[in-house]
Amino acid sequence: MKIKKNDTVIVIAGNDRGKTGKVLKVFPKENRLIVEGVNIRKRHTKPSQRNPQGGIIEKEAPIHASNVMILDPKTNEPSRIGAKIILDEKTGKKKSARISKKSGEMLQ
């Protein structure tokens, strides 16, 4: 999976199409992720020690990774992700870096 935690993504398919948000959690085995403010579900909870009031809680549910695209840091548009091998100046070793296909800008 090319999308990581704390990446800014835009939803390209589904009911929340067009919404942007930060990736909160990634589930690589299921190829799903949780995006802040996207795919909100209501859960009815009984009163408990943690939540003495109980009631209806709104929570983000996971969405499939194919339904989101990463936002290009330069142009703020959806972009695909590529990899580029760079030379680390401190150690002299080769490292793989994620880049945006649209602008060539490095991602975090």
Image: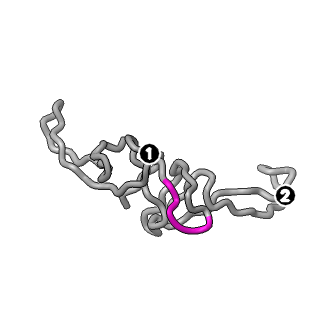
Q: Which of the numbered marks, if any, corresponds to residue 3?
A: none
Q: Position of residue 78 (x, y in %)?
A: 42, 54
State the residue position of label 1: 76
Could you tell me which residue is drawn at 48 percent across and 48 percent down?
8
Q: In the picture provided, is 51 more to the left or to the right than 59?
A: right
Q: Main secondary structure of the magenta part?
A: loop
Residue 27 in percent (x, y) is at 48, 61
> Residue 14 magenta-drawn?
yes
Q: Which is nearer the N-term, disc 1 or disc 2?
A: 2
User: Which amino acid type is shown beneath numbered disc 1?
Assistant: Asn
Can residue 33 be seen from the camera position used here?
yes
Residue 32 showing in the rendered view:
no
Circle 2 Cα neighbour tier, 10 Å, few/some/many (<14 / 14–19 / ≥20): few
Query: Does dot 1 land on a helix, a strand or a loop?
Result: loop
| Snapshot quadrant of residue 69 | bottom left
Label 1: how many residues lie within 10 Å, few (<14), some (14-19) or many (20+)?
few
Give the residues in magenta. Answer: 10-15
Residue 67 relative to residue 50: left or right: left
Residue extending farthest left: 92
Q: Is residue 72 left or right of residue 84?
A: right
Nearer the observer, 16 or 58: 16
Residue underneath mark 2: 55
Instruction: From the viewer's side, name the closer residue of 87 and 51.
Output: 87
Q: In the image, 61: left or right of 97?
A: right
Residue 16 in magenta stretch = no
* Residue 12: % across, % down: 50, 63
Identity of the amino acid at label 2?
Gly
- How far apart marks 1 and 2 lie (CA) works out to 38 Å
Which of discs 1 and 2 lies nearer the camera? The answer is 1
- Quadrant in the rendering for residue 108: top left
